[in-house]
Image: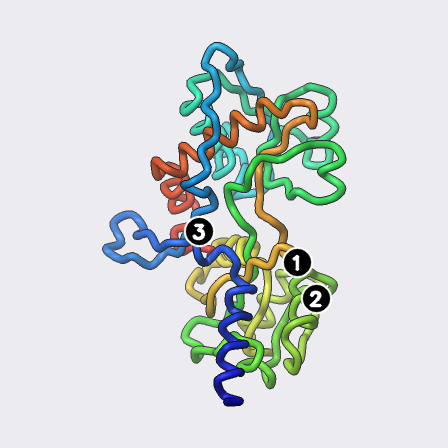
Amino acid sequence: MAAAKILLLIFLFSLWLQPFSCIAGETAAPNSGKSSVFIPSLFDPSNRPVAPDPANLKPIRFLTADDYPPFEYLGADGNLAGYNIDVARALCSELKVACTIQPRRWDNLLDALEGKEGDAIIASLKETKATREKARFTAPYYLTPARFVTVAGAKTYDVRPEGLRKATIGVLAGSAHEAFLRAFFPGPTLVPFPDREQLMAALVAGQFELAFDDAIGVTIWINAQKNSDCCAFQGGPFLEPGFFGEGIGIAVRSSDDSLRQTLNWALQRLDERGVMTELYLKYFPIGIY
């Protein structure tokens, strides 16, 4: 009886930790011959947003940053490139409207939107209590999962709370990831680091068995290394919104709900047609989920 109760608790805990798993799927990376890249579907197929009236559509001026690869950056030709940039262009193509994408300083994006220098922000801006005071957000088109990571070739770890009671885990000091482990993973020794560079360098040097961090940040760090095969994710994504956010959407002025609904319709259309999956695999071929 005790064993059965433990198994039930483990099952319920896994569902709670990964609330999007019920609507997720696996998709093959281009030319991989495998079906191994986990991609959550963030759009409910039973939800049918009302299509915008083409007569009411207007050109959209997107605001973004230019210093956060692979999401937005200046390419070798001096033009904007990146995942968010391609999503913006795909939206404009789906809506059949003209668009501009203008870079701004990150700390000036919301003020520029409020000042009507643009119509929408597509720059990986998180929806928080503070940002909701200045803007409204579309449905999320990608998530920011937390993941465990080890050096490549490490043994397979049981990354449930009971499997890591005696582990030593590196984290970023004061991060949501450290707070999450302290709240739900009793037992492991946590080693805080002031920044990701030091955290990942210590992991590669063998100072502890695992790190727990933002999967996107880790992926960007790995891609910047000469040895991009240094590390590997272990276990699945942790998507608890109270700690890791509710995903990334597009911000519009609070008074412009019509544009928000139009963008929601176009995002769902792009998801249904497989365009969002293609763009995700283009920039994250190894997967962040």
Q: Nearer the viewer, residue 160 or 20?
A: 20
Give the mark nearer the N terminus: 2 vs 1: 2
**Image depth: mark 2 or mark 3 in front:** 3
- The answer to whether residue 279 is above or below residue 111 is below
**Amino acid type indicated by mark 3:** Pro
Residue at the (58%, 28%) spot, across then down: 260
Identify residue for label 3.
40
Q: Is residue 231 visible?
A: no
- In contact (CB < 8 Å): disc 2 and disc 1: yes
**Amino acid type indicated by mark 2:** Ala
Q: Is residue 179 visible?
A: yes
The percent coordinates of residue 193 (x first, y second) are: 69, 67
- The answer to whether residue 71 is above or below residue 57 is below
Q: Which mark is residue 262?
A: none
Element type where label 2 sits in the image: helix
- In contact (CB < 8 Å): disc 2 and disc 3: no
